[in-house]
Each structure stands twice: as structure tokens, then as C-alpha cells.
Amino acid sequence: MPSQGPGDWQRLLAEPEKHWRSGYSAKALAYCWEEADGFPESVRKVFQQSGLPIFSGIKILFAFPEHKVPLPGGGNPSQNDIFVLARSQDGLISIAVEGKVNEPFGPTVSEWQPESSPGKKKRLAYLCKRLGISDNGLDNIRYQLLHRTASAMIEAERFHASCSMMLVHSFSQEHKWFEDYQSFLGLFGKDGSPNSITQLNSMDGMELYAGWVTGEEGNSLVLLKSFLITRPHFT
């Protein structure tokens, strides 16, 4: 069903009352993306300035809030804040959006599996293989960044997209937790900066990217706002 406004996003949250608060990512993302005609201006600007042909003229086809992607090993799926299927002049692009204001990226790999169960071992091995990285040196990497990026690749395969991307849309003007994102890029031998896109690798004909966008400051302080226009690309 097409979204009628930001309030429709709340019911999709794992804990709707707890997570739907002003100054937090779920609400900031909902208002920012619903208000935009396509990609928010902060995101569109980073795409345009990247100079990468795949992001030239990129347009949203569909966007799904709180989109769940199952992963091997049992347990919870990867619940993307927004999953975007987009199109550019070079083809389809699968984008997993992770929103942040001041919230961290969750536990590190060592915190996530202090005592590895068979299911967690299976999942971590799958994520490493999917991302094309070694399973060494992961202890201080935020687990969320691993499975969020993998979910973008999984959905790219499902929709026959040639490009996948994990996009952090942060509303922190101080770039909180950016160092964790940098550590994640280091697994691919890459470096990055706020408001930029980094190509991580290319595997089996699919290009993988990561990006960090600093959102408009006002969206992290949303209080009362209403929308009268339906944005049919949110489903």
C-alpha cells in the first residue's frame, strides 16, 4: 500500500512506541524522505558530486521502509531502515539505507558473538563470503554494517541489479560514529569521507558501493509536521 505520510512508517518499527521519537533516526528519516520528491536533496547532491556514471540521473523506482532481508544462520533478518530500488542510465541499483542521528551502529562483531553459536558462525561466514572479505580482524567492526551491506547485495541479485550500495544517512552534524564506518571501509582497503561515495569491490559482475550522507540538520529535530501529498513510491 502506498504511504500516506511519515506516520505510516511508525507501525513498521520493531518497537513502534520506543523508536518513534523526535531527534532519532526513524522519525528523521521518515519526514526527510517523505518530504522529498525522489531522493532527499542531501542524498541527491552527494550522488551528483560523486562523478560516478552509475549515479548519474539516478531516480527512485520504489522505496520500502523497514524492509527485512533474511540471512542464513537463523535469528533476526537484516531490517533496513529503507530499501530503495533505483534506476540510472547504467541500470538498476539496490540501496540499503541506514539512518542515524546520535545512535551508534550497535554491537561490534566480538560483542555480537562472545560465544559463537553454530548459527552465528554460519551467518558470519556467509557475510564474509558475500562481501568478499576475510574473517580476520572483524572483532571491532560493527556487525550492523556487515549485514546491512550484504542485504543490499542480496536484493540486487533478486532484482537483477548490477549495482548495490549501503548508504548511511546521518543527521549528526558532528558526524558521530563516522570512525566506525571508516573501520568498515578498511576491510576493503578503502578510505572515505563524509558526503562521499566509495566503491568497495566488484564481484561476479556486481559493483558494491558505500556512502555517507550528512542530512539536513532540521530533520533531526522534527516535532510536529503533516503532509497532505501521497508519495506513491513509498510502499
Image (spheres, grey):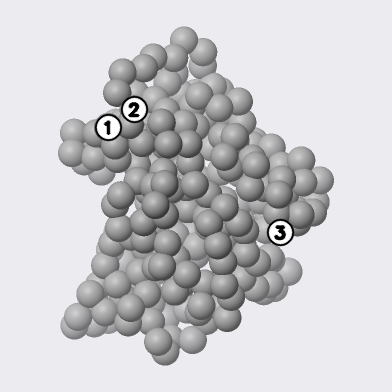
Please tell me in which quadrant of the rendered image residue 220 appears: top left
Q: From where the camera sits, is residue 229 visible?
A: yes
Which residue corresponds to the image point at 46% horizontal and 23% vertical from the top-left? 3
- Looking at the picture, which amino acid does disc 2 mark? Val
Q: Residue furthest front?
A: 174
**Dot 3: element:** loop
| Lower sequence index among marks 3 and 2 | 3
Asked whether disc 3 touches disc 2, contact meaning CB atoms under 8 Å apart, the reply is no
Which residue corresponds to the image point at 25% horizontal and 43% vertical from the top-left? 14
Asked whether disc 1 touches disc 2, contact meaning CB atoms under 8 Å apart, the reply is yes
Image location of residue 41, percent across then percent down:
59, 34
Determine which of the numbered discs, if any, sits on residue 222 in the image.
2
Q: CA distance from mark 1 to mark 2?
A: 5 Å
Against 147, residue 234 (above or below) is: above
Q: Is residue 180 left or right of residue 167?
A: left
Q: Quick one: 136 or 40, which is closer to the camera?
A: 40
User: What is the number of callouts on the image?
Assistant: 3
Please tell me in which quadrant of the rendered image residue 188 appears: bottom right
Which residue corresponds to the image point at 25% horizontal and 72% vertical from the top-left? 112
Q: Which residue is mark 3?
A: 162
Q: Quick one: 231 or 21, which is closer to the camera?
A: 21
Against 223, residue 16 (above or below) is: below
Q: From where the camera sits, is residue 67 visible?
A: no
- Looking at the picture, which amino acid does disc 1 mark? Ser
Q: Which residue is mark 1?
A: 22
Q: Is residue 16 left or right of residue 215?
A: left
Q: Quick one: 183 or 87, which is closer to the camera?
A: 183
Other-residue count near label 3 (Cα within 10 Å), few / some / many at <14 / 14–19 / ≥20: many
Please tell me in which quadrant of the rendered image residue 106 appears: bottom left
Which residue corresponds to the image point at 41% horizontal and 67% vertical from the top-left? 179
Q: CA distance from mark 3 to mark 2?
A: 36 Å
Image location of residue 128, percent across then percent down:
47, 78
